[in-house]
Every structure is written in structure tokens, then in C-alpha cells.
Image (cartoon, helix red, strand yellow):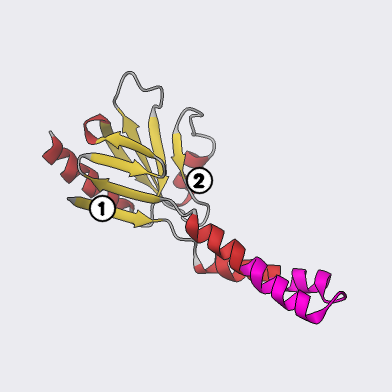
């Protein structure tokens, strides 16, 4: 049973910013050929958008496991989960960050959730994941963790 699922899609402003690929490629290829410039601009924009969408990580809480990106953690090893927003989130991603932490963060998603790992054999002290719905993620961890125990 799935308790939580979130795909970390890029924000709309990312897709708009990627539009700068179009005039840049036109500037380079229009002197060669108008058709080449237009085709290259469309292909480059499509490829960059496609790669961003295809590589957007997913966070799920289901079947007694937390999955963030490529890593999975059984809920029995999930400790305290804390949400951070604004300046606090910036500190968690920067000056307070432990180099051993598992990170699934995206710059276009400001809130982060810090999830303590209680497995003593795991060298990772915590996971830090971006989430547009940090309170829902924490609630799902709590309710799924209670059912898993």
C-alpha cells in the first residue's frame, strides 16, 4: 500500500529558462542554414527538457520502505523527520550538511526534510530530501512506520 509519492518535477521557470537554448543555437547555426538552426534549436530544447523530466527523482513511502531516488530505507530504521523551509532549509543544504548524508535535493524545491537513519551499521547519519509537501511526507513516515512496527 502506498502512503506517499512525490516526483520532483522541475518548476515551470526552469522550462522557461531552458528556452535560452533556442536563441543560442539559432545564433550559432543560422549563418550555416536557417533550417539547420531551427531544427537544432528544437532538438536541443527538447533534449534538455526530456533529460530533466526523465531524471526527476521520486520519493515514495510504501510497503514498509522509504525510497528517495535510487536508495531505499526500511521504515524500521527511520528516526525523527524534520521539515525545514526558507533560510533554515538553506542552512541544512549548506553549512549544517554532513558530508555522509544521503541527498536527494533539487535547487528548484526549497523545503527539505531531514530524516534520521537509526541503523547503527549504516554510515549515513540522515537523509536530506527536497519536498514540495514536507508535512505530508513526515505524516506518511509516521503513519507507515507505526503500521510497520
Q: CA distance from mark 1 to mark 2?
A: 24 Å
* In this view, 4 is above or below 14: above
Q: Which residue is mark 1?
A: 4
Main secondary structure along the magenta-highlighted residues:
helix
CB contact under 8 Å: marks 1 and 2: no
Q: Determine whether, in the image, residue 106 is placed left or right of residue 73.
A: right
Q: Which residues are magenta?
A: 22-45
Residue 23 colored in magenta in the image: yes
Residue at figure coordinates x 63%, y 68% from the top left: 45
Q: Position of residue 90 (x, y in %)?
A: 50, 45
- Secondary structure under the numbered disc 2 in the rendered image: helix
Q: Determine whether, in the image, residue 112 is placed left or right of residue 14.
A: left
Indicate which disc, 1 or 2, sits on the residue closer to the N terminus. Answer: 1
How crowded pointer 2 is (Cα within 10 Å; few <14, some 14-19, many 20+) is rated as some
Q: Position of residue 83 (x, y in %)?
A: 35, 46
Residue at figure coordinates x 20%, y 39% from the top left: 64
Which mark is nearer the camera, 1 or 2? 1
Dot label at residue 71: none
Q: Which residue is mark 2?
A: 90
Residue at figure coordinates x 21%, y 31% from the top left: 76
Q: Residue furthest top?
A: 121
Q: Determine whether, in the image, residue 41 is placed left or right of residue 65.
A: right
How crowded pointer 1 is (Cα within 10 Å; few <14, some 14-19, many 20+) is rated as some
Amino acid at each position: 500500500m502506498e502512503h506517499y509519492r512525490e516526483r520532483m518535477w522541475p518548476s515551470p521557470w526552469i522550462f522557461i529558462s531552458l528556452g535560452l537554448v533556442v536563441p543560442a543555437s539559432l545564433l550559432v547555426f543560422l549563418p550555416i542554414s536557417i533550417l539547420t538552426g531551427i531544427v537544432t534549436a528544437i532538438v536541443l530544447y527538447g533534449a534538455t527538457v526530456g533529460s530533466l523530466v526523465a531524471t526527476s527523482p521520486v520519493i515514495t513511502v510504501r510497503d514498509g520502505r522509504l525510497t528517495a531516488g535510487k536508495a531505499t530505507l526500511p521504515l524500521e530504521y527511520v528516526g525523527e523527520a524534520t521539515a525545514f523551509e526558507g533560510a533554515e532549509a538553506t542552512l541544512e543544504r549548506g553549512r549544517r550538511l554532513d558530508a555522509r548524508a544521503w541527498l536527494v535535493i533539487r535547487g528548484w524545491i526549497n523545503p527539505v526534510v531531514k530524516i534520521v537513519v537509526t541503523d547503527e551499521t549504516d554510515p549515513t547519519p540522515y537523509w536530506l530530501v527536497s519536498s514540495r509537501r514536507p508535512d505530508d511526507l513526515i505524516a506518511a513516515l509516521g503513519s507507515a512506520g507505526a503500521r510497520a512496527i
